[in-house]
Image: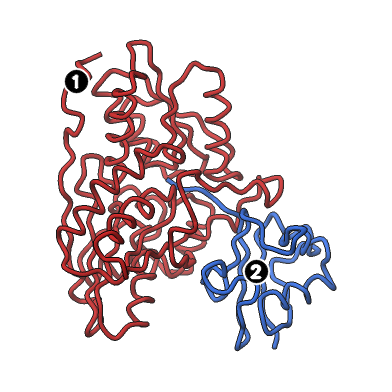
Chain colours: A blue, B red
Amino acid sequence: MTHTIRLPTILRVHAGGEATVSARGGTVGEAFADLGKRYPGLVRQLLDPDGSVPVFVNVFLNDEDIRYLQGLNTPISAPSEIILLPSVAGG
Amino acid sequence: MVDLLAPVSMGLSRTPLVRLEALSPPGVDIFAKLEWVLPTGSIKDRIAVAMLEKARLEGLLSPETRLLEPSSGNTGIALARLAMMWNIPFTVVMAEGASQERVEILKTFGTEIVYSPGDEGSNGAVRVAGEMAASGDYLMLNQYENLANVEAHYRGTGREIVEDLDHVDAFVAGLGTGGTLMGAGTAIRESFPQAQVVAAEPPMGELITGLRSIDAGYIPPIFDPDRIDRRILVRLAPTIEHTRTLLSVEGLFAGPSCGAALAVALRIAREMRSGTIVTIFPDAGWKYLSTGIYTGSIQEAVKGATNQILW
């Protein structure tokens, strides 16, 4: 099962300049692990040394923030879109 | 400076809560709180009054005070009105790329504008304002850190909703400073403990290029992610589509953050058989006419608005 991962501009440098990359996996964490095989620098930005998602990174699976699902263990049951965004203020 | 003991709630009034008659699906009631009836046309009048009143009570205002605030527009405009009334010099730090209307309104209200790099978005405005405030020459109320922001929504926005409705299953609000979600969300949960608090998030971070790394992201100190239940991303195309739907179907000329909130409210409505959803419409469309989001094809509108700060 292949998923599309959209990268914000500031992360594209770690993925050869690509705006979207593909990854396989049955959970968000598995998709990140698959991504890490090809783009280790990218995954170092997405995961803290303890393996959790840093607070400044927001990971949206089909537009839902995974923090409010099951985090990196969130299952993905169909080919999906994962969007990564830095935290940005408004107001 | 005029008498600072004059009623600082001047111009604030209860805002209308309306049922979206045509857009509420069968069995579900979607209510929207129309914040654009406030004096400068946005929800930010609430927090501007609350933050200045808090500063006054803390003795922070003097004839020498110079105010400073980072803002993408509405907070700056709301503070500008009060600063003008009270003869307080006011400087707003705004990212390049704000709509021309916002710039003109701020100038009309006598405000000095300092631009921060557009490629850093609102995060850059926070950074530059922080550097300026470090000089000690300014009083920065700082909507991102000021608990009066949350209080204004707890005592005002949230309490009004609780008084107007017998039941709430979900509360949807846009995420900017987090003030509305924290304040009104808490008030609503106190009365309706089962209510879900849901953030509608614009995809602003996608095109920001000026951050040194992803660690340079910014989480407003007043926003506690653990106090919401869901956070849903709304992209530019559905934001614009739903903003237009509000006008064509409900006759509400709303700003883009209303379209994003509606998109999330409808998503939640589709997940329930029956229930009550309440959402916040922060401002009207007037300030966004120059962004091109209301006319032409959605594709063109998205292209035109992509590098603009709408939130």
Which residue appears at 45% of the width and 29% of the height? Answer: B113
According to the picture, the residue beneath numbered tag 1 turns out to be B5
SS at badge 1? loop
SS at badge 2? strand
Extreme-top residue of the structure: B63
What is the crowding at mark 2: few (fewer than 14 residues within 10 Å), some, or many (at least 20)?
Answer: many
Which residue appears at 23% of the width and 47% of the height? Answer: B156
Residue A38 lies left or right of residue A82; in this view the side is right
**Coordinates of residue B289 in the picture (x, y in percent):** 34, 52
Residue B276 lies left or right of residue A85; in this view the side is left
Q: Residues under labels 2 and 1: Cα distance?
A: 52 Å
Q: Nearer the viewer, mark 2 or mark 1?
A: 1
According to the picture, the residue beneath numbered tag 2 turns out to be A6
- Residue B234 in view, yes or no: no
* Quadrant position of residue B146: top left
Per the rendering, the mark at residue B297 is: none
Query: Along the line of sight, which residue is nearer the eye, B288 or B212?
Result: B212
Q: In this picture, is B233 found above or below B306?
A: below
Q: Amino acid at mark 1?
A: Leu
**Coordinates of residue A75 in the picture (x, y in percent):** 61, 82
**Coordinates of residue B224 in the picture (x, y in percent):** 48, 52
**Coordinates of residue B240 in the picture (x, y in percent):** 40, 65
Q: Amino acid at mark 2?
A: Arg
Which residue appears at 65% of the width and 72% of the height? Answer: A72
Q: In this picture, is B14 found above or below B55?
A: below
Evaluate if marks 2 and 1 touch, with contact meaning CB atoms under 8 Å apart: no
Q: Are marks 2 and 1 on the same chain?
A: no
